Image (cartoon, rainbow, N blue to C red):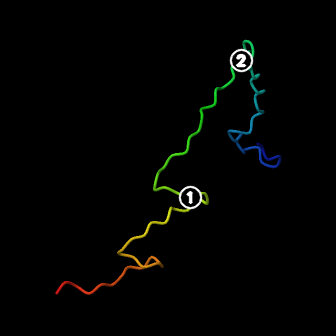
Amino acid sequence: MRDKKDNATIDLPGFEPAAPPAPVVEPKRSGPRARRVSLKQEQLELLEETDTTGLPVWRRDDQLDLTGLPVWAPGPT
């Protein structure tokens, strides 16, 4: 860019006119696209058995009370 008042200003790089964009060539497809075969999904038992609501099946534990807290038993004497 040149300043009209100052002839000593040099041309700055990057301000030249832009080159035209290259044409975009898309590859041609041969025939219809192959249909993907979907894999059958199966439920995995990762943690423990669950009931119909998705919650773990209740199992009675002698070390826990009905609220799930540990039972404090006196130590062996």
Query: How many labels, in total?
Result: 2
The answer to which image quadrant residue 12 occupies is: top right
Residue that mark 2 sits on? 27
Q: Is residue 41 left or right of residue 31?
A: left
The amino acid sitting under disc 1 is: Asp
Residue that mark 1 sits on? 51
Q: Which residue is at the far right?
A: 4
- How crowded is the residue under tag 2: few (<14 C-alpha within 10 Å), some, or many (20+)? few
* Residue 20 coordinates in the image, percent (x, y): 78, 27
The answer to which image quadrant residue 55 occupies is: bottom right
Q: CA distance from mark 1 to mark 2?
A: 53 Å
* Camera-side mark, 1 or 2: 1
Residue placed at 49% from the left, 55% from the top?
A: 49
For marks 1 and 2, the one nearer the N-term is 2
Dot 2: element: loop
Looking at the image, residue 67 lies above or below residue 56: below
The numbered dot on residue 40 is none
The amino acid sitting under disc 2 is: Pro
Dot 1: element: loop
- How crowded is the residue under tag 1: few (<14 C-alpha within 10 Å), some, or many (20+)? few
Residue placed at 47% from the left, 51% from the top?
A: 46
